[in-house]
Image (cartoon, coloured by chain):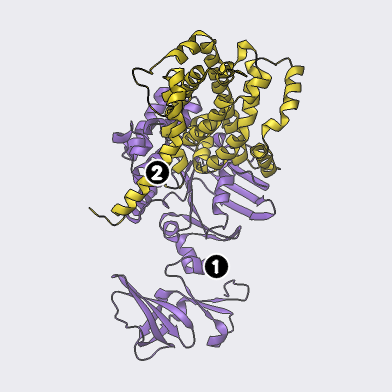
Amino acid sequence: MSTATRSLPRTIGAHAILLTYTAIALFPVVIVIVNSFKSRAAIFGAPLTPPTPKTFDLIGYTTVIGQGDFIHYFQNSLVVTVASLFFVLLFGAMAAFALSEYRFRGNSLMGLYLALGIMIPIRLATVAILQLMVASGLVNTLTALILVYTAQGLPLAVFILSEFMKQVSDDLKNAGRIDGLSEYTIFFRLVLPLVRPSMATVAVFTMIPIWNDLWFPLILAPSEETKTVTLGAQLFLGQFVTNWNAILAALSLAIMPVLILYVIFSRQLIRGITSGAVK
Amino acid sequence: MGSLNIENVKKAFGPVEVLKGINLEVTDGEFVVFVGPSGCGKSTLLRVIAGLEDSTSGRVVIDGADVSATPPAKRGIAMVFQTYALYPHLTVKNNMGLGLRQAGTPAAEIDRRIGIASSMLSLEPYLSRRPAELSGGQRQRVAIGRAVVREPKLFLFDEPLSNLDAALRVNTRLEIAQLHRRLKATMIYVTHDQVEAMTLADKIVVLNAGKIEQIGGPMELYNSPANEFVAGFIGSPKMNFVDGGRLGETAKTIGVRPEHLTVDAKSGAWKGTVVHAEHLGADTNVYLDCEKAGLITVRIFGVYNAEPGATLYATPDPAKTYRFGADGKVLK
């Protein structure tokens, strides 16, 4: 069957390329998950084979759940990620609304200033941040992490969201003003629902680096109480002996929550990435 | 109730002056149309009246009260937008009722007014639908309904028909005209389409480059335009402008409307060659390249067969010829 827009060789070619890319992208993840179900000897003996009844071993998972306080680490990671995400989206959207909606002196300068963080890695300021946290007594608290991650996520959020907010119909906002809606109602009830796809995009881009981060938990909140999953997994990474079963199991478990959040956002995300391309 | 006075309103965006001192008086119950080319400031003027833009200087007075510093919701106005601007998450009924609810009107009163407006605009079957489930024409009727429900002193329409297709545009135009007759409300309507202006208005305000060129009734503007701009803007096809010098006239420019020219195959004032003919059924537009007058348009009523390349003579009706001075103003 041939149509005007498709030809068989091209379709095969495109799919071959995409499938190869998918395989390459998924390979490490699959290896991690597959090996997390194998015994230590099997991980090193045949790292690429799936677990057989002989090599199948849940020792990694039992170690993770039994040894470290992993449920607690998960909780910490989730609290930090969700809270940072919430603040990034809230403040990012509000700043973006102000930048896109109101004409004021220094508007574009302010926009540039808020977006500057995209270009300057926040880790450059680690020492200053640590001093600040020590001075304010926030070391070894989740608050410290939430504050840092909110700051880290805001520039990109403001940048992306203000572009999308410019596309929201002025007429709609003006109709709201004539109907007597306050600026807050216009923002929360009219504008935010319309930029939801782009909010999801920002959410995913913000969430993943926060969840995976090792740097700031290690420096700002390494105590047992405030350990995050990525930091907790380091428990099994010894200088001389490394418990690979436990590490792989911990990493496999750590993928799950991000995966769930991603699935929640992904329907919105696809619309976000393609919006504007197709009207 | 429902008069409007605009006193020397100026509006500048940075160094760009969009409105250069507008003075206008609208009496109660009038249908006033602002018309002009894009960028002439007509929408900005409407926004200043609505309170969505602050004027740089000047006063806006609605019903005798200076509203220059009053927020839009308190000015007693309602506005219909080009893009409908319905709230996507609300049903038709809630779209119409939101403004009243916001103002604290009792629920029974809101329902009564929505009932009246929706029967007036035949929207009853759609009250529980969301805007996404409506066609363009229905959406614009909801937007009009939302304005009607507020019982405003002043209706503001910002190019409400521009997003509709041609057939719907005529229908909705008729509905707006009927609405005006029924409500006897003051309406201000912005459009770039002179047909809408001519068919709807009691009074047309022709704007150009931030200034009012002329104010008057539709026929007044058609029959006695004040200047070259108005003469060219009102009427379709556009008025022909011929350099006065080439015709041996004292006036800088001579203007003749296409419908005030007659053609003849044998003799006439201006000899020309047919460039193109547009057959519209009821009338025919012939483009003539004349030796004396340059390229002109002639509108002939009924069917007229003119082959490109043929020679035709066009004769202007002397009683309906306009003479413009060097400043563009009409010479008496």
Looking at the colours in the rendered structure, which chain would you say is drawn in yellow?
A: A
Give whichever of A129, B241 is nearer the camera: A129
Within-10-Å neighbours for mark 2: few <14, some 14–19, many 20+: few
Give whichever of A121, A183 is nearer the camera: A121
Residue B272, position as x, y percentages in the image:
42, 87
Q: Is residue B327 above or below residue A18?
A: below
Give whichever of B201, A126 is nearer the camera: A126
Q: Amino acid at mark 1?
A: Phe
Q: Residue at x 43, y 59 (%)?
A: B198
Residue B206, position as x, y percentages in the image:
53, 60
User: How many labels were placed on the picture?
Assistant: 2
What color does chain B have in the rendering? purple
Chain identity of mark 2: A
Q: Residue at x 48, y 18 (%)?
A: A245
Secondary structure beneath disc 1? helix
Residue under circle 2?
Answer: A18
Q: Which one is closest to the eye, mark 1 or mark 2?
A: 2
Report the residue that reaches farthest toward the bottom: B266
Q: Residue B101: in sight, yes or no?
A: yes
